[in-house]
Image (tube, rainbow, N blue to C red):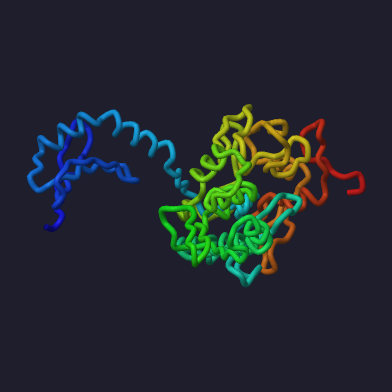
Amino acid sequence: MATTDRTIRVGTTNVTIRTSNRTTLGITVTQHGNVIVHGPPTTTDADATDLVNRRCSWIYRQLAHLAKTAPHAPLKELVPGTGFDVLGRRHRLRIVPDSNQNEPLIQLRGTPTGSWLHMRHSTSLKTDEARRTLINLYVDSGREWLEVNLPQIAANTIDRNLAATFSTRMRTTWTRHHTSRGLTLHWATAQLHPHLLRELIHRTLNLHTVANTHDLNNALRTLWLGRLTPPENTHPRTHFTSTTSGHCPDCSAPPGTFHADRCDIARCAHTGLQRAHCHPGNTCNTIWTGQIPGQAECTEYGFYCRPAPGGYEPCNADDPDAMHDFNRLYRKCRWDRAAQRMSLRPDT
């Protein structure tokens, strides 16, 4: 006979009664937290309620486990400064004029101000296009990593010619291993630090693992899964302006307190550069002053710029569209570790 569903309420929980040609009662909790009672066509609401009440402790344990292990699915805004991890390295988004580049997205690694993703302005205005562009970046980055690291991993398996790809179609699993088609990884796993990505592959292939399983599980829960929202305000200066009474726009730290770990805006106390996996523990964290790091120095030294046909040009503070020129700040200044600020170089 065909399967039929109906829903009842047991306490504060919605329960689906699914009847079929089976002869016994059973209960499951789905990945989405739905409670389903399976039974024969003669199953009554009272039968289902009695089973749920008898198994309530087990149900609550299952729901608690789902809540603990469910992905956070963070929502990211398409504004300058938003952070995106690529193979464990934090990149900040920069919206650039269309005249600056032909590609919708360019990745810049290891600049004096950290790593950046330069996205064309027109791309940032189309949420779906921006999402596809960012996902393709992760697929390409993951593929490059596999080209270098997969041979070493495959050497520890029976299949020395193991194939592996990153997929944009996987929805509910991080990895899948097929005996003939090889290994498939969710595109979002290219956000993981390489040692965690390697651990995930080893786990999937039942190889020896050395990384902390707890760290991997926590990292998987925090991966960005493609949720984007357009900016509420498209003027670039509004996203980097703060007062001494405001919280950090990235980690929400109140003025006078340390930034949260992995905050995009925090600066390393030792080097003055963006703080991202630069020193062990919390030894290089800095305090949120109420202003974007370097903003006070740009104001003091008169470092301002504005959009121009060829990119950006120096300007005065009172010129239209003027914004703090952080690139010039890092070119002309050096980090004073004692004063915890940028100071002009002697030859400037």
The x, y position of residue 125, in whole percent, is 49, 62
Q: What residue occupies the far bottom of the structure in this picture?
A: 102
- Quadrant, the N terminus: bottom left
Instruction: Give the camera-side residue of 323 and 175.
Output: 175
Where 213 falls versus 139 (above or below)? above
Relative placement, left or right, of 13 versus 143 is left
Where 47 falls versus 176 (above or below)? above
Number of labelled discs? Answer: 0
The x, y position of residue 240, in whole percent, is 60, 46
Residue at point 54% right, 48% down?
203
Residue at point 48% right, 65% down?
129
The x, y position of residue 254, in whole percent, is 57, 30
Residue at point 15% right, 55% down?
3
Residue at point 64% right, 50% down?
194
Where 11 falls versus 210 (above or below)? above
Q: Quadrant of residue 250?
A: top right
Do we see residue 283 in this rendering? yes
Do we see residue 124 in this rendering? no
The x, y position of residue 272, in whole percent, is 75, 41
Relative placement, left or right, of 301 versus 134 is right
Relative placement, left or right, of 302 versus 169 is right
Instruction: Give the camera-side residue of 91 and 157.
Output: 157
Q: What residue occupies the far right of the structure in this picture?
A: 347
